[in-house]
Image (cartoon, grey):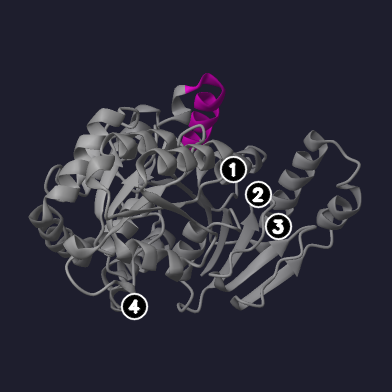
């Protein structure tokens, strides 16, 4: 089997998903949908390299293919050509690679980059385009589908692709409403499953109620609402005196300023977690009593899944598909993304109620073993690809 993925080379989610296929003896290729560095988690894959020199010293059996045709032209011209011209060359390169490689399957991981790119190439084919799987990530449809400039492009891609996959039933229904008539694939987390034996070793020993770290996702972007989280922590600071707040993925100066003022006003210490490996980040989840993830749009939120795998009690915004995973008030709290008072009440309850967080860990642990264990997920994913190849329709 020969599969060409079109996706973000820097994405840990793409790397983890594709790694599920690394030991099948299949030919796996990646065409980059963005100009980013290669995530070292990729293994047993060939990636088409452009002007970026991909570092593969930490990756296992990764081969960089230097495309000698249009990519060479792109390398020489990138400093002088306009962005539009570059995009034309990028699309032309993918078109030629599909013609030459003749993959059995093209799989676009994410819509706004990989999906749109593949769609533009698919439009040039009258017949003979390989089977195409389009995977929805995060806000691809739930948020971007509400904007006219994206809605039309999403509908075109959904009309062109043969298979659609998403990590929550909500987005499956949205795709069907937007006109998708192909085959819906099984719902899986976009990053695949977890090695539960390994993650168990990364957890702090003892009950979750003994942990004294509160972990906050630091995104303050078009979707992320970390500042609302800091405001909520301020509102319940009276119960946080023995706790330490750790913030990760905080790229906004506003978050740093707000956190500094929070510490000055409350005396509660805050630490910013620098960029780290996936295992190191899992250790942080494994030290946390509470995980807080707030955004105006998301799918499952891989961060929330990582939290429940590592035992942290999740407080997740209702704009995700958390309701398809946790029972509100039992396995975690599902809250409005922009209401600090409700979020503060959820934090307070999770701090004061030891039984709540310990029972949630037990309940979520059963869910994790049933739906997130890679020993369960991986065979189903591998079989999904086999079924697609064998599908004659």
Residue holding disc 1: 113
Q: Is residue 349 visible?
A: yes
Residue holding disc 4: 198
Residue shown at 56% from the left, 68% from the top: 28
Residue 151: x and y in percent read 49, 25
- Is there a contact, CB below 8 Å, between mark 2 and mark 1? yes
Q: Nearer the viewer, residue 334 or 119?
A: 334
Q: Is residue 20 visible?
A: no
Residue holding disc 3: 97
- Is there a contact, CB below 8 Å, between mark 2 and mark 4? no
- Is there a contact, CB below 8 Å, between mark 3 and mark 1? no
Q: Is tag 3's residue or tag 2's residue first in the polypeptide sequence?
A: 2
Circle 2 packing at 10 Å, graded few (<14), some (14-19), many (20+), is some
Label 4 secondary element: helix
Residue 321: x and y in percent read 29, 41
Residue shown at 37% from the left, 68% from the top: 283
Q: Nearer the viewer, mark 4 or mark 3?
A: 4
Residue 370: x and y in percent read 19, 64
């Amino acid at each position: 089997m020969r599969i060409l993925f079109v996706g973000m080379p820097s994405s840990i989610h793409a790397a983890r998903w594709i790694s599920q296929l690394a030991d099948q003896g299949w030919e796996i290729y990646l065409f980059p949908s963005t100009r980013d560095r290669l995530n070292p988690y990729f293994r047993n894959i060939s990636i088409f390299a452009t002007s970026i020199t991909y570092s593969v010293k930490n990756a296992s059996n990764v081969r960089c293919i230097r495309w000698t045709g249009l990519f060479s032209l792109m390398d020489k011209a990138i400093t002088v050509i306009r962005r539009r011209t570059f995009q034309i060359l990028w699309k032309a390169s993918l078109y030629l690679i599909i013609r030459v490689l003749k993959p059995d399957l093209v799989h676009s991981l994410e819509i706004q980059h990989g999906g749109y790119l593949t769609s533009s190439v698919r439009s040039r084919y009258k017949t003979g385009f390989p089977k195409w799987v389009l995977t929805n990530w995060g806000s691809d449809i739930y948020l971007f589908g509400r904007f006219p400039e994206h809605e039309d492009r999403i509908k075109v891609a959904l009309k062109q692709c043969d298979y659609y996959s998403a990590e929550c039933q909500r987005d499956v229904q949205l795709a069907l409403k937007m006109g998708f008539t192909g085959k819906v694939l099984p719902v899986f987390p976009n990053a695949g499953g977890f090695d539960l034996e390994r993650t168990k070793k990364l957890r702090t020993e003892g009950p979750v109620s003994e942990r004294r770290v509160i972990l906050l996702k630091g995104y303050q972007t078009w979707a992320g609402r970390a500042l609302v989280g800091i405001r909520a922590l301020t509102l319940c600071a009276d119960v946080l005196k023995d706790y330490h707040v750790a913030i990760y993925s905080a790229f906004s100066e506003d978050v740093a300023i707000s956190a500094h003022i929070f510490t000055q006003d409350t005396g509660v210490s805050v630490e910013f977690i620098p960029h780290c490996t996936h295992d190191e980040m899992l250790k942080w989840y494994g030290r946390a009593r509470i995980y807080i993830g707030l955004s105006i749009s998301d799918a499952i939120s891989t961060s929330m899944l990582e939290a429940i795998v590592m035992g942290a009690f999740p407080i997740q915004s209702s704009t995700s598909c958390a309701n398809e995973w946790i029972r509100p008030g039992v396995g975690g709290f599902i809250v409005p993304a922009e209401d600090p008072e409700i979020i503060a009440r959820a934090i307070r309850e999770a701090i004061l109620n030891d039984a709540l967080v310990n029972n949630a860990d037990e309940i979520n642990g059963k869910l994790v073993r049933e739906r997130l264990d890679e020993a369960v997920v991986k065979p189903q994913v591998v079989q999904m690809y086999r079924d697609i190849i064998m599908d004659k329709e």
